Amino acid sequence: MTDSETVIRVENLTAGYGEVAIIKDINFEVQAGEVFIILGGSGCGKSTLLKHMIGLLPPVSGKVFIQGNDIVSAQGQERIDILRRIGVMYQNGALFGSMNLMENICLVLEEFTDIPRDAMEFIAQMRLKVVGLEGSAYKMPSELSGGMRKRAAIARAMTLGPRILFLDEPSAGLDPITSSQLDDLIIELSRSLGITFIVVTHELPSIYKVADRVIMLDKITKSIVAAGRPDYLRDKSDNPWVRQFFNRES
Amino acid sequence: MVQTDYKIDDSGLKLTIEGRLDADTVGPIWSEAAKKLSDTEPSLLEVDAAGVEYCDGTGAALLLQLRQRQEKENRQFIIEGLRPEFEQLIKIFDPGQISEYLPEKFSLQGFIEKVGNAGCRAWDDLKTQISFMGELFVKFFSTISKPKNIRWTDTFLIAEKSGADAVGITCMLGFLIGLILAFQSAVAMQKFGAQVFVADLIVISLFRELGPLITAVIFASRSGSAYAAELGTMKVNEEIDALTTMGIDPVRFLAIPRMVAGVVVMPLLTMFNHLCGLIGCGLVMLSLGFHPITFLNRIQEAATLGDLAGGMVKTLVFGSMIAGIGCLRGLQTGTGASAVGDSATKAVVSSIIAVIVADGVFAVVYFYLGI
């Protein structure tokens, strides 16, 4: 792949909380249209890495380029422009509790576009249909199950049609059928629109189904221990822990 | 960017779209296309999308809505030249027939039903409050009979937050109320040459009514809301459920320490309120030319131990009620961040209403007891 197709580049990223480093000197690139999975054992820093990639946390050192712009150093309008190109689904949905689903989805359209109100509602209904929540547009987040909240959060993340979507544990809490439908949606959006997905997940069936490439983080070395296609890592990785992980062996 | 062109002929309306169809570009086209459709009401809408370079979900929404509008009026819709990947996108995003959200219309019957429902809810809520307070008092007395069962570390911490940390605001409000009340009374009583009795008025009103009441309002808004928010957050995080499944009674574990703290700190805070209120009153008396000894003599002569004790008994009841209602509202919290805020608000409102009702009951009881 040429450098022009790289949508995210992480350079020498070291991150942590206070004095404690969680990840050290990490380097990788994500290509356009790729479904890129971040894996690892509990506490290895997957969510920390994701939060640094979306500019929520400042790194100790290093850079994160999104479509060529460094989100770490970006300020003001430059930062807003970068953030508009990405959508994020948080682990617990992070829907605004005082707004119904329609209002949650319309919020970004109201803030960033001049689309008429009825059109906004149509778009919101469409997004909700995609994630299987038709008929729930006027429900409050507190009236939804955990899985429904998660799906609504994906619908909200897709509202502005971002080119890059970050999903933190999207399938957790969903039934296998809905989870599989979500996988199909990820593949479809990635293939037809060239949307790049960066997904933090533990769900092995989903990983085998959707992943173009994965990286595995290691808690001890605080770095990437393996990178590549999941089936290749499962069968041919040099690292026994990696093979163990992909084969669900204890 | 995106460009559009409209052509009307005998067969219908032809819309040509070229460029990018995304959230940034769709807005103006949407309004324009809707207006053209309303104006021309074409039997056929033909969309030439061969020039569409990029189309995301928002662009697909435009095309889908144009199709829906035509189909709703039993008119034809054709889309031509759209790239296969965008056609696939339309299939993915097609929401089908969307049921419209109709806001409820006003009707007298509906209004009466709503009032009835609200009344029933208020009645049920009152019964819940009474039964919870009953449960709390039973557990309170059974727990204090075995002091080992009280979580003293938590209780002291809560008492510190609700009591010691609230001394400043309680003193400041007491001082200002004493000062303002004395000043206002002095202006009125000057007409009768009775300014010296301002001290009598302030000390009696502070000891019997204002001191306990003001302190209760401060305690309700500061600590009652905090209890509700804290327990509410625990409820949202399923910590209350965890306690229950561990076999630990949440009322004994969480509400009793708060009730004990409330019962202990309310009288102490009220004493500070009294003291500062009297200092405020004394300053006004001093500025009116009265000697401090005169002021102290008037206070001693006007107020009895019964006035002070009567007020203090009230504070015990107010403290337990506010702590209990704060805990109840916290335990009743629904799900979501807004539910915690709602619980805190309800805790303050319910506590203040309960305190004022209880104050009224005390007034009647004290009248018959001759206190």
Image (cartoon, coloured by chain):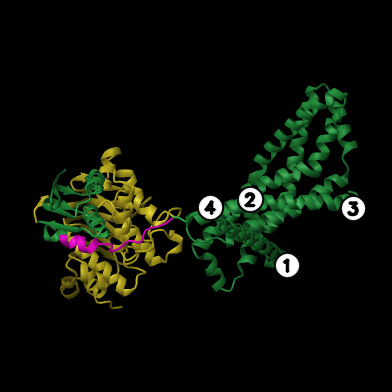
Provide the secondary structure element on which disc 1 rests: helix
Q: Residue at x 65, y 66 (%)?
A: B252
Which of the two residues, B14 or B120, is positioned nearer the viewer here?
Answer: B14
Q: Residues within 10 Å of mark 2 (few under 14, many from 20)?
A: some
Provide the secondary structure element on which disc 2 rests: helix
- Residue B349: numbered disc: 2
Closer to viewer: mark 1 or mark 2 = 2
Cα separation between marks 1 and 4: 29 Å
Closer to viewer: mark 4 or mark 2 = 2
Disc nearer the start of the sequence (4/2):
4
Q: Is residue B99 magenta?
A: yes
Residue extending furthest toward the top: B289
Q: Residue at x 37, y 67 (%)?
A: A147
Q: Are marks 1 and 4 on the same chain?
A: yes
As drawn, B73 above or below B312: below
Q: Quadrant of the N terminus of chain A?
A: bottom left
Chain identifier of the residue bearing label 4 in the image: B
Residue type at mark 2: give it.
Answer: Val
Which of the two residues, A35 or B121, is positioned nearer the viewer here?
Answer: B121
As drawn, A196 above or below A178: above
- Residue B369: numbered disc: 3
Q: Are marks 4 and 2 on the same chain?
A: yes
Q: Are marks 3 and 1 on the same chain?
A: yes
Residue type at mark 1: give it.
Answer: Val
